[in-house]
Amino acid sequence: MRRFLVATTACGVVIAGATIGSAVVLAGLIARIITDPASRTVGALSAPIALLAALWLVRVVTQWQQGRLAQHGASEVIADLSDQVLRTATALPPRELARRRDDAAAVVTRGLDGLRVYFSAYLPSLFLAAILTPATIAVIAAVDWQAAAIVLVALPLIPIFMILIGLATEDRSAAALAAMSTLQSRLLDLVAGLPTLRAFGRAEGATAKIAELGAAHRRSAMATMRIAFLSALVLELLATLGVALVAVSVGMRLVYGHIPLATALTALLLAPEVFWPLRRVGAAFHSAQDGKTAVHAAFAFLDSVEASSAGDRVLEGEHLTVTADVPLMRAEPGRVTVLTGPNGCGKSTLLQMILGLDQAPDAQVRVNGIDVAGLDPTWWWRQVGWLAHRPVVIPGTVRENLQLFGPLSDLDGACRAACFDQVLADLPDGLDTVLGQGGVGLSLGQRQRLGLARVLGSDASVLLLDEPTAHLDGATESAVLAAIRGRADGGATVVVVGHRDAVLAIADTVVHMGVPAHVGV
């Protein structure tokens, strides 16, 4: 950012010098043509015309370079802030992430894009106004103090109105960001529920709701545009008024011979350059305000999340023992530990605590005697194969989904262990079959087998399986449980959530979990 600001300031200095120089040269050239007929020759005019063209070229090239730097700086800042927000959001416990995902999504998907206008239009205009406007007033004062006095009287009106408009647009930008977050979350929920509505023949009822959401978004956008257009109109009127006053004063004095033509033309040509940067600042201010509001929201999100206490400890050895204080549980290498109990008692939460994704005030999870919070999460997650209650399936091929968490050394063996090879035989393109969002193209049981193949085929030394035989028939369940038992016999530490007799039958240790308070959820 410092390099960007320095480069932008340097460009502003060059643009200001070229602008003032070209105005002075053009005024002298025109005055010379009008007052000195003998100088209207190609040889006499070639030098000032070439100088004028050079100054214009320098200004154009510098403005292009300034815009290029602004776009590059905006992209870097947006990418960096988005990365920070996403990293912070994904580090949240699952429940906290579900509660705050709309805030993070609104900032990342749309809000921070407003920073592009802030860097590409607002900041360059602000730097140019800070350099060009005072320099232009100084040059005007040097050639015509009366025109400079008029400019100094009219100029403060623009910042005053900019402040008034800014106070209004600040609240409006915050309201627009909040409205966008609400509309986005409601629309996503509605779209996500369309398959269910269609299954029950109620999809047509969503049409009116979508139209209502679209109308609300349109009203919010139009209100924003109305403020932007009105602010631009006010600033243009004030700038036009200031230039007109200078033109009237210079014109009257020129008529009566109280001012030389070259001086009058210089004042007239420089007067718009006094107001032009401020007009650009005012025009870009509203759009930039949206980006600034999003930045404040992003920083508020980052500040509201406690700093991660994850450590950087890496354990040596392949055999890992997992213990939890509440409930009293010890999962050892070569053994299958089954967590059972009524729904809502915290079985899935305990798996998330073992992963380091969740915390409970009255429970502690240790790996080989080390608190899981003290482990390097990247290293720890590489040691764990996790089958969630709902296996994650992303849009893409079956092969990409099987290797979502890393390549499998024996892809065919993994598919056989999970009985997923039977599913592949029925798919039109086998491993290259393309799946839709959420696993569209596979049944619930087939998605379960895909998730099982992904875990059983990994080289992880710890397996966490949340109801691995859900949605499976009896024969497939037996084969899968035999594969899980085989992984434990091979030295893996296996923790399974389940309550069916077949699952309990493969357990070396069964942990009965009671009410939710026992695990701090």
Image (cartoon, grey):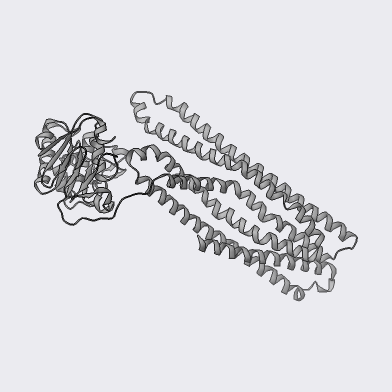
Residue furthest front as drawn:
362
Q: Nearer the viewer, residue 220 or 327?
A: 327
Q: Is residue 416 left or right of residue 153?
A: left
Residue 429 in view: no
Q: Choose top left, top right, bottom left or bottom right for residue 97.
A: top left
Taking the spot 38% from the left edge, 45% from the top edge, the residue there is 89
Taking the spot 55% from the left edge, 64% from the top edge, the residue there is 7
Taking the spot 78% from the left edge, 66% from the top edge, the residue there is 142
Residue 116: image x %, image y %? 52, 52
Taking the spot 76% from the left edge, 56% from the top edge, the residue there is 151
Residue 20: image x %, image y %? 70, 65
Instruction: Answer above or below: position of 272 versus 162.
Output: below
Location of the C terminus by quadrant is top left
Q: Is residue 23 left or right of residue 364?
A: right
Residue 365: image x %, image y %? 23, 44
Residue furthest right as drawn:
256
Residue furthest bottom as drawn:
43
Residue 122: image x %, image y %? 59, 53
Instruction: Answer above or below: position of 17 versus 239.
Output: below
Q: Choose top left, top right, bottom left or bottom right for residue 507.
A: top left
Q: Choose top left, top right, bottom left or bottom right for residue 5.
A: bottom right
Residue 93 in view: yes
Q: Nearer the viewer, residue 398 or 256?
A: 256
